[in-house]
Amino acid sequence: MVKMKKGFSLAEVLITMGVLGVVAALTMPALMTDVNRNTWAQGLKTNMSVINNGFAQMLAVENADTLDETTLWVDHVSSDVAAANQDVKSELGKYFKIDKMITGVPADRPVVTLQAAASNAMDSTVRFYLPNSATMNMVLYAPTVNASCKTIMDNGGNLCEKYADIYLDVNGDKRPNMFGHDIFRFYLSRNGKIYPYGGDDVALFESGAPKWSEACEGKSPSGDGLACTGRVVAEDFKIDYK
């Protein structure tokens, strides 16, 4: 006697596939969001290292103790970002791989229109396109020492001068172009190190600058998201908020 093998009917297979499709449709957006957050956070970690290493190399090669002793600041940087020109690109190009430099935000991709909360000051920055698809928007300064430097140091701070204001977009012109997600802010110090906006060092240096523990707390941080830079760095490069 031949035994018949039990199987699934076409209707059962279709129903199962339909259920799986619904489950996938519900879970995929959340999974993609997690993937994107992890990609942005790791991009931040990588590019922070690139920036710190670049300025450290600048100091080492030029045998300088501080950035104001380097050729870039001595010969090319003034208090007006308009002074940044091809010479700045050439000088930075010795220590950073730069695909191109644009003075001012490109007219076809202005950051201020990509995110309404962005500072208008970003209109006058210099944008550097890096080979790893990231961009750096930089305002370069001829710095002056904070009059409260001793107090800052006594309170554990490390930042007394701001040599540059840096907006790092870890995926360049790709979306979402949101602060605290793919765009992060830093201050460059005289010793060539960058300090995250929202961190204690920036808060001690600049009166009114927020701490991430106040401006970027919880699952849905308030504000424009800039202070979240400090949170991501402090929490070992995790983005676990909306």
Image: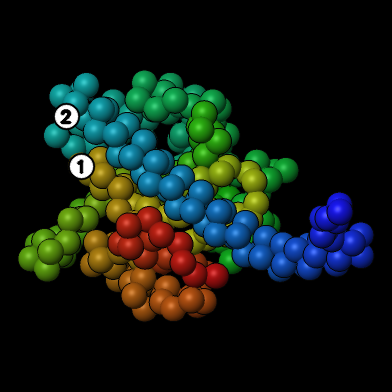
Relative height, residue 225 to residue 107 (above, below): below
Q: Is residue 66 left or right of residue 222?
A: left
Give residue 231's mark. none
Q: What residue is rendered at 36% in x and 21% in y? A: 94
- Residue bearing mark 1: 191
How packed mark 2 is, by other alpha carbons closer than 10 Å (few <14, some 14-19, many 20 or more), is some
Relative height, residue 129 to residue 201 (above, below): above
Q: Quadrant of residue 117?
A: bottom right
The one of 233 and 135 positioned closer to us in this rendering: 233
Coloration of the structure image: rainbow
Q: Is residue 82 left or right of residue 114?
A: left
The one of 2 and 4 positioned closer to us in this rendering: 2
- Are discs 1 and 2 less than 8 Å apart at CB? no
- Residue bearing mark 2: 64
Is any atom of residue 143 visible in this view? no
Q: How far across and how far down the image is residue 51, in percent?
A: 35, 38
